[in-house]
Image: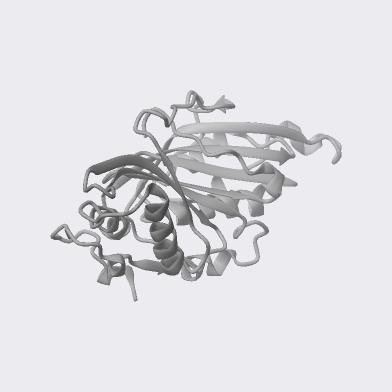
């Protein structure tokens, strides 16, 4: 079923009874077709923070928490965000014997939709700490040219790196707060911070910033944007190792944080930034 048939962008009544069939899976494969050969395109995780979680305990008293969902990049499907919001809100008046029973039910439902093992970790409402971004921020740089749609041709190596011995490879971590794209269904803007960890010939930092900025009018889901960024850097700059991790700002009580890596040892711990 295509995303046009989902609840995204439509007026919707919020269910008050547990409704697992409201979850709307979207296949990952169509957007991955042209990147299927790229190493690491299926290696990584999608972390979601869910800020609107509530259920009833054994005494009928409302419970609240913040959740962190983890979907493996190997899952057959991602889950459309509005359906996920409605799913969690459908549990607001449902009674569970324990917090563990609630988690087990959610994990079963999400794993069925994603066709992979999905996990849920719950935090007390004050326990999810805000992190500071690590690495070198490139947002103050001045790219040679700017475009409004993704163009991998903007990416290039540092000119000095071209004359350096093949064994002289840098390991760097960059980040930018300037990632912006649009929801492919509603057209609403999505903002994020993108982290790039890279080992290989030194890239031109201005070219990476220009490339990130070029997503400003691109229509794509968060996961698809991160996979395109990862694949373009991998194919054009040809690093030995690569990580691309985007922390998107919250919308509808959810934030989505996809991460793709070429090597599992480069998998970061999930974080939450101030804009989330």
Q: What residue is drawn where x is 57% and y is 26%? A: 134
Residue 5 visible from this viewpoint: yes
Q: Position of residue 90 (x, y in %)?
A: 23, 57
For this view, does 175 lie left or right of residue 26? right
Q: Position of residue 151 (x, y in %)?
A: 50, 51
- 130 is higher (above) or lower (below) than 167: above
Q: What residue is drawn where x is 28% and y is 50%? A: 58
Q: Nearer the viewer, residue 99 or 2?
A: 99
Q: Nearer the viewer, residue 264 or 152?
A: 264
Q: What residue is drawn where x is 47% and y is 70%? A: 30
Quarter of the figure with the C terminus: top left
Q: Nearer the viewer, residue 7 or 201?
A: 7
Residue 27 visible from this viewpoint: no
- 198 is higher (above) or lower (below) than 15: above
Q: Nearer the viewer, residue 126 or 179?
A: 126
For this view, does 200 lie left or right of residue 134? right
Residue 178 occupies which quadrant of the picture? top left
- 115 is higher (above) or lower (below) than 275: below
Q: What residue is drawn where x is 41% and y is 67%? A: 113
Quarter of the figure with the N terminus: bottom left
Give the colouring mode of the picture.
one colour
Residue 245 occupies which quadrant of the picture? top right
Q: Position of residue 147 (x, y in %)?
A: 42, 44
């Amino acid at each position: 079923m295509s995303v046009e048939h989902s609840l995204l962008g439509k007026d919707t009544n919020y269910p008050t009874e547990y409704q697992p069939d409201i979850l709307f899976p979207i296949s990952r494969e169509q957007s991955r077709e042209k990147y299927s050969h790229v190493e690491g395109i299926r290696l990584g995780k999608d972390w979601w923070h869910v800020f609107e979680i509530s259920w009833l305990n054994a005494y009928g008293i409302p419970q609240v928490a913040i959740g962190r969902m983890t979907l493996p990049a190997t899952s057959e499907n991602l889950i459309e965000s509005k359906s996920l919001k409605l799913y969690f809100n459908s549990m607001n008046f449902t009674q569970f014997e324990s917090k563990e029973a609630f988690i087990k039910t959610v994990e079963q439902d999400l794993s069925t939709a994603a066709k992979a093992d999905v996990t849920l970790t719950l935090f007390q409402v004050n326990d999810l700490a805000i992190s500071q971004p690590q690495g070198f921020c490139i947002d103050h740089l001045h790219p040679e040219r700017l475009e409004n749609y993704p163009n991998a041709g903007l990416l290039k190596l540092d000119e000095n790196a071209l004359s350096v011995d093949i064994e002289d490879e840098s390991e760097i971590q960059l980040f930018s707060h300037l990632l912006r794209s649009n929801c492919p269904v509603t057209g609403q803007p999505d903002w994020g911070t993108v982290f790039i960890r890279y080992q290989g010939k030194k890239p031109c930092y201005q070219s990476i910033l220009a490339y990130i900025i070029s997503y400003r009018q691109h229509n794509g889901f968060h996961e698809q944007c991160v996979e395109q960024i990862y694949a373009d850097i991998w194919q054009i700059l040809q690093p030995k190792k690569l990580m691309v991790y985007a922390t998107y700002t919250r919308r509808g009580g959810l934030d989505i944080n996809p991460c793709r890596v070429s090597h599992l040892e480069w998998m970061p711990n999930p974080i939450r930034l101030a804009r989330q």
